[in-house]
Image: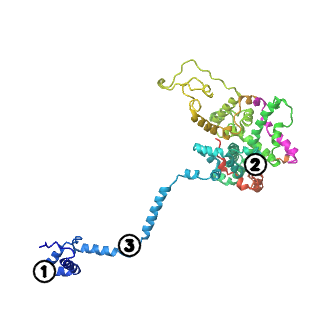
Amino acid sequence: MDPPHITEFASQRYFEKLKQLSESKDQPQDAVAHPHDGPVVAESSTFILPIGRAKSIDHTPHDTHKTEKRRANFSFRTILPSRTSVDHDSRRLSTEATRRKSTPFDQLFLALPNELKIQIIASLPLSDILSLRLASRSWHAMITVNEFPIARYHLEHHVPAYAKRLYPAPDPSSIRLHYLCGIWHRLHVAAKLSYLICERVTKEIFLRTTEAQRLEFEPQYERMRRRLIPLLFTIFHFFETYRTLHIEYIKEHGHGLSKVPYTINPIEAKIMNMYDDETLLRVHQVFPLVVSSFCRRLRPPSYVGRLERSIRGYLKDRPPDEVYVTAMCIGGLRQVERFWEIKGYNSRRGAVDTWFNSVMKEPTETTTSTTKTRRGFMGLARKKSSASEADFMRHGDTHPNGRGRQGSDAGRRGSDASMFSSWESLVFNTSLAEGMPMGELSREQLKMLLPDLPTLQQIWLPTAEALILDRHIVERPQDIKRNAQVMLELIREDGAAEEDEWWYGRAAPSVRPPLEAIEEDPIE
């Protein structure tokens, strides 16, 4: 006889047991209410079908709650995605897509067409463009190769009309970053000197010393500063051009102007003929203010006498007139600005004397001493080489330690040397390698100019006044404004629109450089 728990599949006993099991599931209360039916339930619970094991039914309240909760959650709403799940999925997908497709900004920028890249770079301030040249070799090459469109954009949109009139480009191909930086350097010097002169005039002439007085005088201060910038820019052009033409005159004639009798300085007359009538008149009216402000800056702050100056520590008197002439005719307004910005009278006078002595005197050649000098603390410092640096600057020379000179082709091989030489030419043969405006002169040029400099009273004033009367800009010398009239002319409120059209052209708002922009020198 077969065991009770084994039943042949699809037999009559199989269907009877299956029917009993289904009846026991449909009537669970009867099994609990009638304890005598327990063996039947127990017997059915031990019955095992060949297709799987039946799960035991526990009628605890906790399991019933779980079952009802599980059945309640299974609804049509659970099939559809909720809004939070959709937002979470979309956010997760977008984050993963961004993470997979994120590209650095430099690669995105370099992937643009060359025309768009140059247009974006040209719209940046000039100081930022020059900083980009220092970022990497690729940036340096990109800006150097495209100097012309960048400089032309700035020339059309940011350079004022009076600057382009005084420094016109000889031909379109010469519009380079050096030409543009030269104009911005001169604008920076003019803006800085305008600020310094306005500070001195506000304090010493208009006597605005307290904070409340300066705030009240602020509109007049801004008008004065704004009107002085184009005039100082023209004075910068005058001294720069005068120095160049003076050297050419001495080379051409073999002697200076001191050996030629004249009533009007021919070099000054040639320069002033470049200026229109209104520019010549206004610069002539302001020129004494500029010179007197510079001379006042180099004098001791006290006029009482030697005793008070010695008590206060001002031990040096004002420099002679030839120092002022040399500073303006040799160093230009940039040198004037350098002296002006030095704090403290003694430090300022010391810097003036040092510069003047370096210009007037021949440089002394230092001879090597035969005595053995101490090399530092306990003699442990590095010993300096007695050979001069110029001995190793010739092309092709080798370093004393046997290696090739750094930066030369002697210590490199094959394509490395050719690649470095091409990169070296790209760096040092750019337009900015030509130097800044009104740079230092050689010793031979100084020997030509120094004996032939004019006196302080003969600079600009006699020639300009003669040309103003000759051109009939004014009818009488008394019509030229001087001193207090010039001060009132600088701070007056009316006439700003006509001046803007004259200085900056008809498109005045688009070509007037902001004061914040020209206060930063792009060259230095």
The residue wearing badge 3 is 78
Residue 521 showing in the rendered view: no
How crowded pointer 2 is (Cα within 10 Å; few <14, some 14-19, many 20+) is rated as some
Q: Is residue 421 above or below residue 473?
A: above
Magenta residues: mostly which secondary structure?
Answer: helix
Percent across and percent down for residue 242 are 77, 37
Q: Quadrant of residue 37?
A: bottom left
Residue 36 badge = 1
Q: Residue at x 39, y 72 (%)?
A: 79
Which one is in front in this view, the residue at disc 2 or the one at disc 3? 3
The residue wearing badge 2 is 162
Q: Amino acid at mark 3?
A: Thr
Percent across and percent down for residue 413 are 56, 32
Q: Is residue 150 magenta?
A: no
Which stretch appears magenta? 448-477
Which one is in front in this view, the residue at disc 2 or the one at disc 1? 1
Q: CA distance from mark 2 to mark 1?
A: 119 Å
Q: Are marks 2 and 1 in contact (CB under 8 Å)?
A: no
Q: Which of the two labelled residues, at mark 2 and mark 3, occupies the earlier sequence position? A: 3
